[in-house]
Image (cartoon, rainbow, N blue to C red):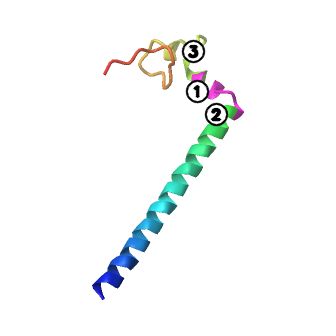
């Protein structure tokens, strides 16, 4: 009886894990698709030179490929 219960629990947990992984994969594919669709312009839009308040040197720029991160 215990072995059968363990098998069902393992099946349920693995099913939930697979479903969660599939959702994450779909979200990643959507994010990559949107980024490639607009050629990454949205990522750098807040960091444009025209917007002085959010210049790339400021800490509020959400994405700056030129920033050197210190760990």
Q: Quadrant of the N terminus?
A: bottom left
Residue situated in front as seen by the camera: 2 or 44:
2
- Which SS class for mark 3? loop
Magenta-highlighted residues: 37-44
Cβ–Cβ under 8 Å for marks 2 and 3: no
- The residue singled out by tag 3 in the image is 51
Q: Earlier in the sequence, mark 2 or mark 1?
A: 2
Query: What residue occupies the far left of the structure in this picture?
Result: 2
Residue at screen point 49% across, 61% down: 18
Count the numbered circles shown: 3
Residue at screen point 58% across, 22% down: 44
Q: Is residue 41 above or below residue 67?
A: below
> Is 39 contained in the magenta span?
yes
Q: Earlier in the sequence, mark 2 or mark 3?
A: 2
Q: CA distance from mark 2 to mark 1?
A: 8 Å
Query: What residue occupies the far bottom of the structure in this picture?
Result: 1
Residue at screen point 48% across, 21% down: 61
How many neighbours does mark 3 have within 10 angstroms: few (below 14), some (14-19), or many (20 or more)?
Answer: few
Q: Viewed as shown, does residue 68 lie left or right of 23?
A: left
- The residue singled out by tag 1 in the image is 43
Q: Quadrant of the C terminus?
A: top left
Cβ–Cβ under 8 Å for marks 2 and 1: yes
Mark toward the viewer: 2 or 3: 2
- The residue singled out by tag 2 in the image is 35
Q: Is residue 44 above or below residue 38?
A: above
In the image, residue 19 lies at what x, y percent?
51, 62
Residue situated in front as seen by the camera: 22 or 45:
22
Identify the image quadrant of residue 14.
bottom left
> Is 33 contained in the magenta span?
no
């Amino acid at each position: 009886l215990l072995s059968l219960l363990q098998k069902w629990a393992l099946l349920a947990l693995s099913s939930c894990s697979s479903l969660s992984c599939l959702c994450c994969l779909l979200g990643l594919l959507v994010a990559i698709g949107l980024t490639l669709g607009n050629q990454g312009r949205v990522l750098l839009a807040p960091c444009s030179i025209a917007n002085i308040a959010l210049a790339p040197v400021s800490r509020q720029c959400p994405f700056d490929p030129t920033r050197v991160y210190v760990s």
